[in-house]
Image: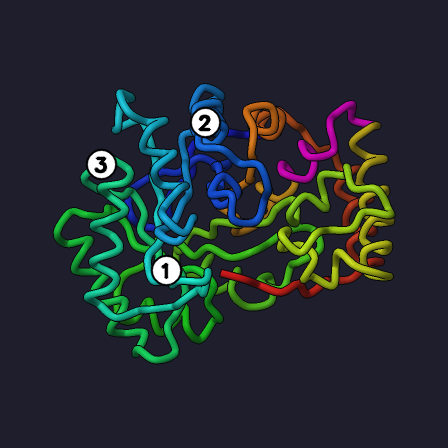
Amino acid sequence: MDTSPRPLGRSGLQISPFGLGCWPIAGMTREGITREAAVATVAAALNAGILHLDTAYCYGAEGESERAIGEAIRGRNRSELFLAGKCGIHWEPGRKQCVDGRPERLRQEVDESLRRLGTDHLDLLYLHAPDPRVPLEESMAELGRLRAEGLARAIGVSNVSLDQLQTAAQACPISACQLPYNMLQREIERDIVPWCRDQGVAIVAYWPLMKGLLAGEMPRDRTFPTTDSRHKYPMFNGTEFQKNLDFVEVVRGEAQRLSRPLPDLVLAWTAQQPGITSVLFGATSPEQVRMNAAAGSCEIDSRANQVIAAGITARGSVMGRRPV
């Protein structure tokens, strides 16, 4: 597939078709993630040419993701990196997640994120999620001011409905929208993708491998401990889980025919869908990064596209809990 940088909406910036989603290295939903492993994972992404790093203020109770990124990028040419961050969510004692879109809070989080990352600006700053207690226009206006001050080069929104996306865009020019999207979860194709294509807004997709489900390594008797967030999702339990694994086998057959690892085919397919600008994959080790980064060389023929499309139609779109 073509791995050339793609326009980030109408911002004048460009973004690579693949990026490293840095939530997993925070260690809040995966066991055994050390600081050393997190830094090594980010470094492996950079060494593999994955220069788009996506993080957030709340990725880790104490900013573990941002701190690991800051350590990994120290000494590297900042102009070669594309750092995307998010503000608007933080953790309170007891691991209680708090959405807070007050302008003063957003500014505070961005300032702290920049200190953790060791940089003076973000290339892309998202509002992580709308705060129902704060008018969305107020939150977006503050992000616009942060951009005007040079703390961010472009503004985006994440985890929004179409109505919220339109409201945000009226309050502040936005260049990107980040939402979950994968072979099984394609709801955004109904409304958000057409709107973004019409308005010149980039779509950055997360969960392309559906938290590992579409990577094809889960046995049918797999269960998840309460420390693993996947135990909360219907698509990882019971009949739904088995149906999803049936679908994975359909895609695996095409990957084998093309002599490609299954994740390569899944990631490349996602990045080639109309309206999708960049795809984030997660990783918790250098090995996982290297495997996922290879997706850029995966060529999908017409037969594979037809088989995948038929499998998607047969399975149907699956709604999963959309956390922030």
Of the residues shown, which amino acid type is indicated by label 2? Glu
Vertical position of residue 125 compared to residue 303: above or below: below
**Mark 2 or 1, nearer chain start:** 2
Q: Is residue 34 magenta?
A: no
The residue singled out by tag 3 in the image is: 119
Q: CA distance from mark 3 to mark 2?
A: 21 Å
The residue singled out by tag 2 in the image is: 36
Q: CA distance from mark 2 to mark 1?
A: 24 Å
Q: Secondary structure at mark 1?
A: strand
Image spot of residue 314 (x, y percent): 85, 58
Q: Residue at x 15, y 47 (%)?
A: 150
Of the residues shown, which amino acid type is indicated by label 3? Thr
Q: CA distance from mark 3 to mark 1?
A: 20 Å
Of the residues shown, which amino acid type is indicated by label 1? His
Left or right, 223 with reference to 111: right
The N terminus is located in which quarter? top right
Image spot of residue 184 (x, y percent): 71, 55
Does the magenta stretch mainly form a helix, a strand or a loop? helix
Residue positioned most to the front? 94
The residue singled out by tag 1 in the image is: 90
Highlighted range, magenta = 257-268
**Which one is nearer the viewer's eye here, 135 or 217?**
217
Query: Mark 3 or 2, which is nearer the eye?
Result: 2
